[in-house]
Every structure is written in structure tokens, then in C-alpha cells.
Image (spheres, rainbow, N blue to C red):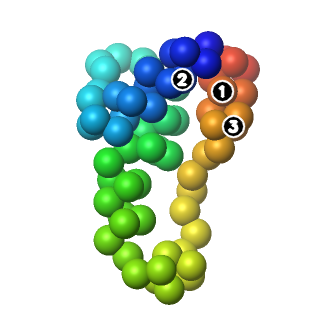
Amino acid sequence: MKELFAQKVEEARRGDHSEGMDIMGSLVRSSYGEQQITRKSSLSPDERAGLKYAVLSDSDILGKTLSL
């Protein structure tokens, strides 16, 4: 499962999408996808500190995927 997770993280960082019902891929993209990286990196440190991101931890993603 950890190997699949690592693969999904790499795909999200490259901006790749898979078609169909890919729950793990969707959860990973929400935390590791290009939009998330761009949104965080385009802000100043003060702006970033004032915002809260809905980012799941790695264990949250794996736990939610395994519970399905």
C-alpha cells in the first residue's frame, strides 16, 4: 500500500491524473497536487501563516483509503 501511495504522490507532483474512481489519487492530489503547491508557494510566509489548508496527512490518506 505504501508503494502505491508513493506512486500516487509522484503522479500528483507531476500533475498526472488517472481516469475513473481513484479515491487514493484524489486524496493525494488534494495534499500533493500542483494547485496545493502553487497556492502555498505563491504566498509570503506571513500570508501562509494566516491561512489554514485542508491538507490530509499521509496516515489520514492511507487510513481513509483502507477503510473503503
Residue placed farthest to the bottom in the image? 46
Q: On the rendered image, what quadrant is the C terminus found in? A: top right
The residue positioned 29% from the left and 19% from the top of the image is 19
Q: Mark 2 is on which residue type?
A: Phe
Residue 16 relative to residue 21: left or right: left
Can residue 26 be seen here? The reply is no
Q: Secondary structure at mark 1?
A: helix
Dot 1, crowdedness within 10 Å: few (<14), some or many (≥20)? some
Dot 2, crowdedness within 10 Å: few (<14), some or many (≥20)? some
Nearest the eye: 10 or 17 = 10
* Image quadrant in which you'd find residue 53: bottom right
Q: Nearer the viewer, mark 2 or mark 3?
A: 2
Q: Secondary structure at mark 3?
A: helix
Residue 23 relative to residue 35: left or right: right
The residue indicated by pointer 3 is 60
Residue 11 percent coordinates (x, y): 35, 28
Dot 3, crowdedness within 10 Å: few (<14), some or many (≥20)? few
The residue indicated by pointer 2 is 5
The residue positioned 51% from the left and 16% from the top of the image is 4
The residue positioned 54% from the left and 23% from the top of the image is 5
* Image quadrant in which you'd find residue 16: top left
